[in-house]
Amino acid sequence: MDKKRSISMAVIKRLPKYHRYLSELLRNDVDRISSKELSQKIGFTASQIRQDLNCFGDFGQQGYGYNVRELYAQISEIVGLSNEYKTVIVGAGNIGQAIANYNRFEKLGFKLEAIFDANPKLSGIRIRDIAIDDIDKLEQYIKSNTINIGIICVPAVNAQKVCDILVNNGVKGIWNFAPVDLVVPEGIVVENVHLSESLLTLTYLLHEKENEIK
Amino acid sequence: MDKKRSISMAVIKRLPKYHRYLSELLRNDVDRISSKELSQKIGFTASQIRQDLNCFGDFGQQGYGYNVRELYAQISEIVGLSNEYKTVIVGAGNIGQAIANYNRFEKLGFKLEAIFDANPKLSGIRIRDIAIDDIDKLEQYIKSNTINIGIICVPAVNAQKVCDILVNNGVKGIWNFAPVDLVVPEGIVVENVHLSESLLTLTYLLHEKENEIK
C-alpha cells in the first residue's frame, strides 16, 4: 500500500521540523521519547504527531514511545536524505555567497559542485575551494555533469532564464531565492525562499497587533 | 466592523505576494487589472483573489477591475508598510551579512540601525556604513534606542538568549534565521526563515517524484 499518495503539503512541511528535533535529541543522547514529550518540545499536539508519523508507517510502540535513532533514520529516509544531492549555486551575490559558505548543508549531505555568476569581477574568486565560474559556462556545465539541485540566487529579472537552462539540461530540483514565481515543466520541484515575503508577513502581524492594542 | 479578526494565516501569507505582483504591475505602468488577469499572473484563481481582497475591504469595481496604484497602496498599508521599521541584525556571519547587504529591504522602508556579533574579529568592520558592534553592547543599545524588529542570525544555541534580550527590552518583532523555535511572550511576533527545513521540503518532494517514476 502506498500511503504517500494522500500526504498533504501541511504534513510534508512539518517533516523537516521532526528531523531537526530528532537530530537534537540524538545529540543529547536521548534514546526514546513519547509523543507527549515530543509534543512539549516541538509544539504540535501529541495526537498531531502520531497522525503525522502514521502517514509514513507504524513508528512508535504503545507504552514505549519512539526510538529516537530509528525514527530519525526513517525520517531522514522519508525526506530523501539517504540520497546524495549535487548542487550548483547560480548567482554569487550576498545570498549566493552566504549559502555557499553555510556548512550546515554539507553536513546534511548536500555537495556544492560549482558556483556561477554573471559578474566578471567575481570570476575565479574561490568560496570554500570552489572558484566562481562565468555564467556563460553554466549550460555546458549542466549538460556535462549530473546536478540534482540548482540554487538560484540571481536577480529576479534573470531567474526564469537561469531556471530554464537548469531544467532543460536535467536539473530536477530548484531552490529559488529570487523574488519571482518560476514556471517549470511537470516533474520539476521548486522550493522558494522569498525573504521579502517573509518580512512582510512579519510586518503584517506586527501591524495587526498594534491595531489590537489601539 | 473589524474584518481582520477572522483572517486566516493562509490569506496573510498570500498578501506579500499580491504586494510583489502589484509592484511589478506598477513598474510596468499597468493602471488597472481584472481579477482574471491578475489570476493568470499570480497563479491563484480569480475567485480566490476576490475572496482574499474582500477580507480587507471593497476593492475593485465590477467591470473595471482593480486600480493597480490604489490596490498597491492599500495592500502596502495592510501589510504595515506605512510604518517605518527600525531593525538590528544580531549575528554577522554569512546570513547576517547577506541580509545587511540586501538593499531590497531598505527600499521597502526598513532601516538597519545596528549590527552585533560575538566575534571580536568582526568588531568595527563596516557593512554599508554600519560598524559591527560587540554583542555585549546589544542590551544597552536596545534599552536606549527604539528598535522594532530584531533579525536573529546567530547559531541555534545562542538564539533564544539573544531573543530574550531583544524582547525584554521592547523589540516586538523577531525575524529569526536560527534553526530553532523561539519562545516569546504573548504580543511578540516571530517570523522564521528556516533554510534547512526549506531544503528538506525540496528533497522530500524530489524523492517523492523519484518514487512515482519507479
Image (cartoon, coloured by chain):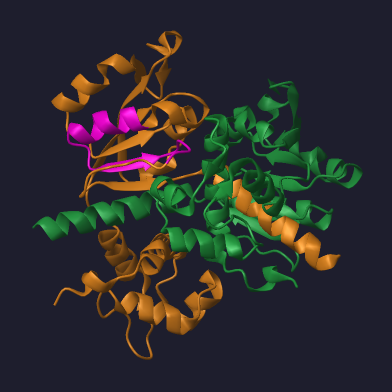
Chain colours: A orange, B green
Asked if one can make out residue B32 in the rendered structure from this viewpoint, the answer is yes
Q: Nearer the viewer, residue A72 or A26?
A: A72
Given residues B97 and A67, the one toward you in this image is B97
Report x, y in % for residue B149: 73, 47
Residue stretch rendered in magenta on the structure:
A160-180
Query: Which image quarter is the N terminus of chain A in?
Result: bottom left
The residue most toward the bottom is A63
The residue furthest front is: B63
As for residue B113 lying within the magenta part, the answer is: no
Residue B198 percent location from the top left of the image:
42, 51
Number of numbered labels in the structure image: 0
Where on the picture, by quarter, is residue B167?
bottom right
* Residue at the (69%, 22%) spot, across then down: B128
Asked whether residue A81 appears in the rendered view, the answer is: no
**Camera-side residue of B20 and B119:** B20
Left or right for A180, reference B141: left
Where A68 sits versus B35, above or below? below
**Magenta stretch containing residue A175, yes or no?**
yes
In the rendering, at what x and y percent does residue B1 appear? 75, 73
Q: Which percent across, then down, holds residue A51?
A: 37, 81
State the image quarter where residue B135 is shown: top right
Q: In which quadrant is the C terminus of chain A drawn?
A: bottom right
Give me the residue at 36% from left, 27% from top.
A90
